[in-house]
Amino acid sequence: MLARSLVALLALLALARFGRADPKAKAVDIKPFRDKLVVLKDANGGIYVVANEKDDDAHVFYGTPSGKTLVLREQLLDGPRSWDGDSWSVTTQAPRVEYPFQGHVEKRKDGSFRVTCGQKVDAGLSEITGEKAKDILDKAQFLTTAYFYRAYLLARDDRGIYYYVDILRDQYGGSGHRVFIGKKGAMKQVPLTDVASDTAGEVFSTKTGDLRLVRTVAKEGGETKTQAQWIRGEKSSELISLDVYMNNPLIYRDLGVYKVSGAICDTF
């Protein structure tokens, strides 16, 4: 009986460490900057709520009405902001579009607004003012980003099997890796059983094998390179390590790991 209880306890501890459920988005209090918010709308019905004052932090929220509730997700800011008189621009992450994987919400010199996504989308936005804007700010749910995780590792073998690891973003705890393996568009999460990390790299142990990362430093220039291996039993396979940033669209769109992102450019 004691042995069974111990086994159950160890299983629960492993689940808490490696099998935790996705975190929940947190409510964002807009009261400190509510009077600085601009409410905008695109032709698809998307709502943008933006604050971009020079001497204050920027805030960008986006969402599309669904039923009776309008959920506006906080956007991850990326890159510099700019101002030119009354005109301004604020940049957000848009990992599903082409390089440099950014979206922009802008107020132009003529007083009009627009959203741009990469190099292909340039769409006008109309401003919502008065009671309609107040009604949106009063009734909408303002939540933190739907990107709970950030990319940590991407590799593949010569048969097109991808190996992907992500980790919780700092605002959601900053720990808790997940491992996904499979063909593009058919990735499956593989339960973790252990994670070993030291100066030489990391080993992500799963029920089906170990994903080993070995970091080596080149003799010239001090360039750090990452080597990846998939180890199953006595068999070891070298993997091609891929840059996670330059493969943003592959990770956040094509692999199929992330179904919903809530980013401003996803609907274009």
Image (cartoon, helix red, strand yellow):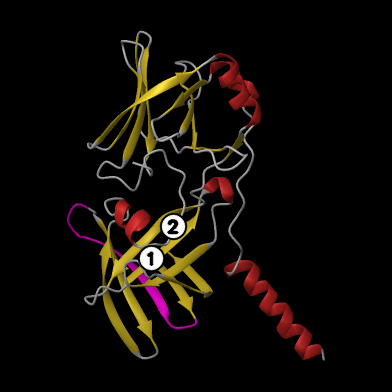
Q: Residues within 10 Å of mark 1 (few under 14, many from 20)?
A: many
The kind of secondary structure element at disc 2 is loop
Mark 2 against mark 1, which lies toward the viewer?
Answer: 2
Q: Position of residue 66 (x, y in %)?
A: 55, 42
The answer to whether residue 149 is above or below residue 88 is below
Res. 114 in view: yes
Q: Provide the residue designation for mark 2.
A: 258
Residue 214 is one of the magenta-drawn residues? yes
Query: How far apart are labels 2 and 1 at the CA level?
Result: 12 Å
Looking at the rendering, the stretch of residues picked out in magenta corresponds to 207-221
Q: Residue at x 45, y 57 (%)?
A: 259
Q: Residue at x 69, y 74 (%)?
A: 12
On the rendered image, what quadrant is the C terminus found in?
top left
Say whether disc 2 or disc 1 marks the residue closer to the N-terminus: 1
Please tell me how many numbered marks the rendered image carries. Answer: 2
Q: Residue furthest front?
A: 67
Q: Is residue 23 left or right of residue 236?
A: right
On screen, residue 32 above or below 205: above
Residue placed under numbered mark 1 in the picture:
164
Residue nearer the viewer, 258 or 192: 258
